[in-house]
């Protein structure tokens, strides 16, 4: 009797386990079938599907990718093809964040019930219109390519959130992708969209965060003067500047990028306040653009001694920043404290649309990063930095507020940064440029920013 009871219980247990597993599989199948279909091991399905996939356009209706006579083709201009590669993608899924990777199933008309088995004439393929401008991207790419620069360029409308220009290098022509071998320095990082998926030491661009923390916590911080001799011993270590700056206030310290000034502020504020304001500015948080996570910017001084805390205030120590996030910070400064969320998908059109692509929401606010009064003070400082130190002609006819940075990478090289925004009312553009091994941002990143901004301004202004 006991054996019969034991066997019955075991049978019931196995039956329940079977149906529980079956239910779990069905739920996962319904929720994840489209993702499974586009995994690399199923590339034979998705690759063949691209031959009938929907088109991808820029903001002006310029074709970036389309299917013609059973073949996937790309823009006629090789400059444009290379410039928008990381945004659009190629025939593979190597660039994981690209439109043709993330939304491949929608582009090819994948059906949960029939897979890719529908006749071409009945497939619900999607056409996608992006917010980027092909010529603006090509202009930024040209400015990078002429010097063989690697890095990232992003420009977006800080009122609407539309990304106008997004370029990552190194890149390649999707019509003739190279065979990239391990250790090939020429194409190192070619499969990574560095605008979205990379982070770099921010260098002096982080002084915007330190300045904001000081403005809101130190009495009359913006008016405080400090005498810079070119170096200072903080926590037993030297913090150095490029040259002695003499007696300067915060406005002047931002313009000449005085390390001593902001290092001493960081120590005075302390680790807790510096961490709070870094977090308020979006460090240690994950932002998204479309269905992609943006690489986290990192600020962590939990194990920092006094010297390390000082260096963290000038964007060194272990600080890391993502280019798109830095552009968002500039958007917040331009908008009085709150950034506008960036997006790249402007419109989606298809016949019998059942996909998951959603156009971006224009002008959607992100979490407030700082007080409006603080944002206004930072905006004035950044504008003063351009007019007093860089020269207003650096950006041609555009009026720009900006901050450069030169970040020590740790291997004896330095990355060059520039971040900022255009103050002209008819051209609300926030931007960030990071040049790997570029040295001084004023000499490497600034010319690239100018090329990207001038072309983006023509697009926004419609001329």
Image (spheres, rainbow, N blue to C red):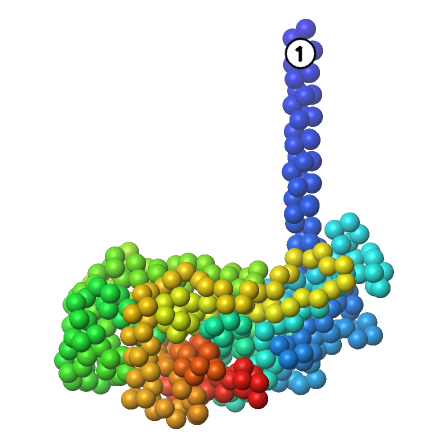
Identity of the residue drawn at 65% across and 72% down: 129
Q: Residue furthest front?
A: 425
The reply, left or right, for residue 451 in relation to residue 266 is right
Q: Residue furthest top?
A: 1
Looking at the image, residue 323 sits to the left or right of residue 117; the answer is: left
> Counting other residues with Cα less than 10 Å from the Cα at mark 1, is it few (<14), some (14-19), or many (20 or more)?
few
- Secondary structure, mark 1, is helix
- Asked whether, in this view, residue 355 is left or right of residue 136, the answer is right
Along the horizontal axis of the image, is 160 left or right of 64? left
Quarter-of-image position of residue 376: bottom left
Seen from the viewer's position, the closer of residues 163 and 314 is 163
Q: Is residue 379 above or below residue 126?
A: below
Quadrant where the C terminus is found in the figure: bottom right
Residue at mark 1: 5
- For the N terminus, give its image quadrant: top right
Residue displayed at 25% across by 57% down: 272
Q: Quadrant of residue 209?
A: bottom left
Report whether residue 195 is seen. no
Give the percent coordinates (x, y) of residue 409. Answer: 37, 73
On the image, the x and y values in percent for residue 415 come to: 39, 78
Residue at screen point 83% across, 60% down: 122
Q: Position of residue 269 (x, y in %)?
A: 21, 63
Q: Residue at x 74, y 76 (%)?
A: 73
Q: Position of residue 242 (x, y in %)?
A: 25, 83
Q: Residue 358 falls in which quadrant of the image? A: bottom right
Q: Is residue 278 above or below residue 389?
A: above
Note whether 8 is above or below 204 in the view shown. Answer: above
């Amino acid at each position: 009797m006991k054996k019969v009871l034991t066997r019955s219980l075991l049978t019931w247990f196995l039956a329940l386990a079977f149906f529980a597993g079956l239910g779990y599989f069905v739920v996962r199948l319904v929720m994840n079938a489209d993702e499974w279909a586009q995994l690399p091991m199923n590339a034979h399905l998705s690759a063949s599907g691209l031959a009938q996939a929907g088109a991808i356009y820029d903001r002006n209706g310029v074709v970036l990718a389309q299917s013609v006579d059973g073949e996937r083709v790309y823009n006629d201009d090789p400059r444009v093809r290379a410039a928008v590669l990381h945004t659009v993608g190629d025939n593979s899924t190597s660039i994981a964040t690209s439109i043709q990777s993330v939304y491949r199933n929608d582009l090819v008309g994948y059906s949960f019930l029939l897979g890719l088995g529908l006749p071409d004439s009945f497939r619900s393929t999607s056409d996608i219109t992006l917010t980027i401008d092909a010529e603006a991207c090509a202009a930024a790419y040209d400015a990078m390519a002429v010097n063989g620069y690697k890095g990232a360029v992003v420009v977006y409308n800080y009122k609407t959130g539309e990304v106008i220009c997004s370029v990552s290098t190194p890149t390649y022509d999707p019509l003739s992708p190279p065979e990239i071998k391990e250790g090939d320095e020429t194409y190192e990082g070619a499969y990574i969209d560095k605008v979205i998926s990379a982070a770099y030491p921010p260098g002096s661009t982080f002084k915007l965060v330190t300045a904001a923390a000081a403005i809101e916590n130190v009495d009359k911080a913006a008016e405080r003067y400090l005498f810079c001799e070119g170096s200072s011993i903080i926590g037993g270590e030297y913090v150095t500047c490029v040259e002695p700056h003499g007696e300067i206030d915060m406005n002047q310290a931002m313009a000449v990028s005085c390390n001593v000034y902001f290092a001493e502020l960081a120590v005075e504020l302390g680790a807790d306040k510096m961490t709070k304001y870094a977090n308020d500015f979006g460090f240690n948080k994950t932002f998204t653009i479309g269905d992609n996570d943006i690489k986290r910017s990192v600020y962590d001084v939990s194990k920092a001694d006094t010297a390390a805390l000082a260096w963290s205030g000038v964007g060194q120590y272990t600080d890391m920043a993502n280019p798109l996030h830095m552009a968002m910070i500039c958007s917040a400064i331009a908008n009085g404290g709150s950034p506008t969320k960036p997006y790249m998908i402007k419109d989606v059109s298809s016949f019998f649309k059942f996909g998951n692509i959603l156009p971006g929401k224009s002008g959607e606010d992100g979490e407030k990063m700082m007080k409006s009064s603080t944002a206004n003070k930072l905006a004035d400082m950044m504008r003063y930095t351009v007019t007093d130190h860089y020269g207003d002609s650096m950006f041609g006819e555009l009026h720009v507020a900006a901050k450069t940075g030169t970040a020590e990478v740790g291997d004896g090289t330095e990355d060059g940064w520039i971040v900022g925004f255009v103050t002209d009312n008819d051209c609300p553009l926030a931007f960030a440029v990071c040049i790997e091994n570029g040295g001084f941002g004023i000499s490497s990143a600034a010319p690239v920013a100018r090329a990207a901004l001038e072309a983006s301004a023509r697009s926004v202004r419609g001329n």
